[in-house]
Image: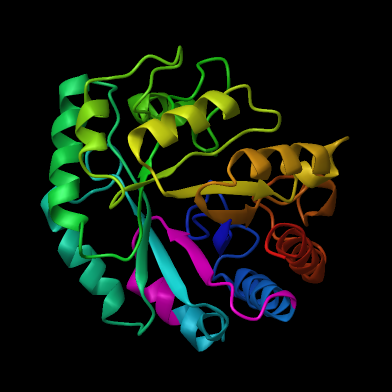
C-alpha cells in the first residue's frame, strides 16, 4: 500500500516551516535526517522522499546535501504552480526540473502541480493539457493537485491568508471536482493521462470526502496517490482510528504518505510550522507510521 514516504511538505515555504525560527534550515536538516534514519531502521527498502520544494530552489537542495539529508533520501520532490503562484512560465517546467537534476543524482518527483479555476475553468483545462505534455516522461512521479476544491468554510494551510490578495482564494479552487462533488471541465482531460498522472489529495481529520474520493480515483484510473499523515493530528482523540480508516480506504492505491505538521505543544513556537522542541519525537512518529502501515 505504501509506495513511499515523504519527509515534510514544502520545507522552504514559510507556510510550512517557520523561517524566523530556522532561517537557514539547520534545524530542518537535522529533523529530516533523523526522520530518514528512523524510517530506514523500521523498513529496509521503503523509499524516502524529501518533501516537495516550493519554490523550486537548487540552493536549498545543495544545503540539504551538505548537511547529510540527501544521504537519507531516495528522491527529492518539487511543487510548481506557474499559472497561479510562481513567477515563471508553465513552459519552463523542463528547465525547472533540470535545475534540480543538476545538483543531485536523486530522482526528482513532481509531488504537486496544478492549476486553479479561480478565473475560469477553461484555464485549468488548458493548463492540465499543457502540464501533461511538458511533464509526462520527465519525472518518475507526477501528482496533480488536487481532486477536490477546498471547502470554502475551511482555511487554506498558509501563513499568508488574506494578505495574499486574490492568490489566497486560489487555494480553494484547485480541484478537478467542485466543493459539492460535481466535476469541472478538466476532469475528462485528466482521465486521458492516467495512470501517468497521479493525484495529491490531502484529507483533513475525519474528512467527509474520503469515501467519495476513493470512488472518483478508481473511476479515473489513478494508481498513485499522495496524501498526508499529520503528526499534529496524532494527538487528537481517536487519531489512530482515523489514520487506520484513511489508510484502509486507500489500500488499493500506491500511496506516498507525507509526514508533517508539528503539534503546537511540541513546537518551539505554538504553531504547526515550528521546528519541534525534540527532533527525535518527529522521527519516532515517522517510524511508528511506517511500522503501522508498511509492515
Vertically, is 225 above or below 215? Answer: below
Q: Quadrant of residue 146?
A: top left
Residue 145 place in picture, x, y as percent = 38, 40
Residue 202 place in picture, x, y as percent = 54, 39
Please say whether residue 54 is one of the residues in the magenta stretch: yes
> Going 30% across and 73% down the picture, which residue do you hit?
100
Q: For the magenta stretch, what is the residue range? A: 42-62
Numbered disc total: 0
Vertically, is 247 above or below 42? Answer: above
> Going 34% across and 73% down the picture, which residue do you hit?
58
Q: Identify the image quadrant of the N terminus.
A: bottom right
Q: Identify the image quadrant of the C terminus.
A: bottom right
> Going 48% across and 25% down the picture, which residue do you hit?
150
Q: Is residue 17 visible?
A: no
Q: Quadrant of residue 107?
A: bottom left
Vertically, is 24 above or below 260? Answer: below
> Going 50% across and 78% down the picture, which residue do you hit?
64
Vertically, is 203 above or below 71? Answer: above
Q: Between residues 163 and 181, which one lies in front from this camera angle?
A: 181
Viewed as shown, does residue 150 lie left or right of 114?
A: right
Q: Between residues 254 and 31, which one lies in front from this camera angle?
A: 254
Residue 134 place in picture, x, y as percent = 14, 54
Residue farthest to the right?
237
The structure's colour scheme is rainbow
Viewed as shown, does residue 221 lie left or right of 240?
A: left
Viewed as shown, does residue 174 lie left or right of 234?
A: left
Residue 104 place in picture, x, y as percent = 36, 82
Q: Between residues 289 and 93, which one lies in front from this camera angle?
A: 289
Q: Quadrant of residue 122?
A: top left
Q: Is residue 233 visible?
A: yes
Please say whether residue 264 is one of the residues in the magenta stretch: no
Amino acid at each position: 500500500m505504501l509506495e513511499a514516504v515523504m519527509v515534510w511538505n514544502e520545507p522552504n515555504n514559510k507556510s510550512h516551516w517557520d523561517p524566523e525560527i530556522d532561517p537557514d534550515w539547520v534545524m530542518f536538516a537535522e529533523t529530516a535526517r533523523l526522520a530518514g534514519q528512523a524510517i530506514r531502521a523500521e523498513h529496509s527498502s521503503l523509499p524516502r522522499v524529501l518533501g516537495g520544494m516550493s519554490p523550486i530552489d537548487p540552493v536549498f537542495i545543495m544545503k540539504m546535501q551538505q548537511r547529510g539529508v540527501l544521504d537519507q533520501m531516495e528522491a527529492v520532490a518539487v511543487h510548481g504552480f506557474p499559472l497561479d503562484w510562481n513567477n515563471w512560465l508553465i513552459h519552463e517546467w523542463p528547465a525547472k526540473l533540470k535545475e534540480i537534476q543538476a545538483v543531485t543524482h536523486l530522482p526528482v518527483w513532481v509531488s504537486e502541480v496544478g492549476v486553479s479555476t479561480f478565473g475560469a475553468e477553461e484555464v485549468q483545462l488548458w493548463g492540465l493539457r499543457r502540464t501533461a505534455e511538458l511533464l509526462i516522461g520527465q519525472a518518475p512521479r507526477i501528482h496533480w493537485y488536487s481532486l477536490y476544491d477546498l471547502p470554502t468554510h475551511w482555511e487554506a494551510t498558509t501563513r499568508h491568508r488574506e494578505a495574499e490578495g486574490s492568490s489566497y482564494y486560489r487555494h480553494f479552487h484547485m480541484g478537478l471536482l467542485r466543493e459539492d462533488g460535481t466535476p469541472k471541465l478538466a476532469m475528462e482531460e485528466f482521465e486521458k493521462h492516467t495512470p501517468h498522472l497521479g493525484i495529491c489529495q490531502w484529507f483533513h481529520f475525519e474528512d467527509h470526502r474520503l469515501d467519495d474520493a476513493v470512488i472518483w480515483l478508481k473511476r479515473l484510473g489513478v494508481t498513485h496517490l499522495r496524501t498526508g499523515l499529520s503528526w499534529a493530528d496524532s494527538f487528537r482523540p481517536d487519531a489512530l482510528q482515523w489514520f487506520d480508516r484513511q489508510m484502509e480506504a486507500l489500500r488499493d492505491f500506491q500511496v506516498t504518505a507525507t509526514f508533517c505538521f508539528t503539534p503546537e505543544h511540541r513546537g518551539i513556537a505554538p504553531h504547526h510550522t515550528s521546528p519541534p522542541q525534540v527532533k527525535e519525537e518527529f522521527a519516532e512518529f515517522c517510524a511508528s507510521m511506517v511500522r503501522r502501515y508498511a509492515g
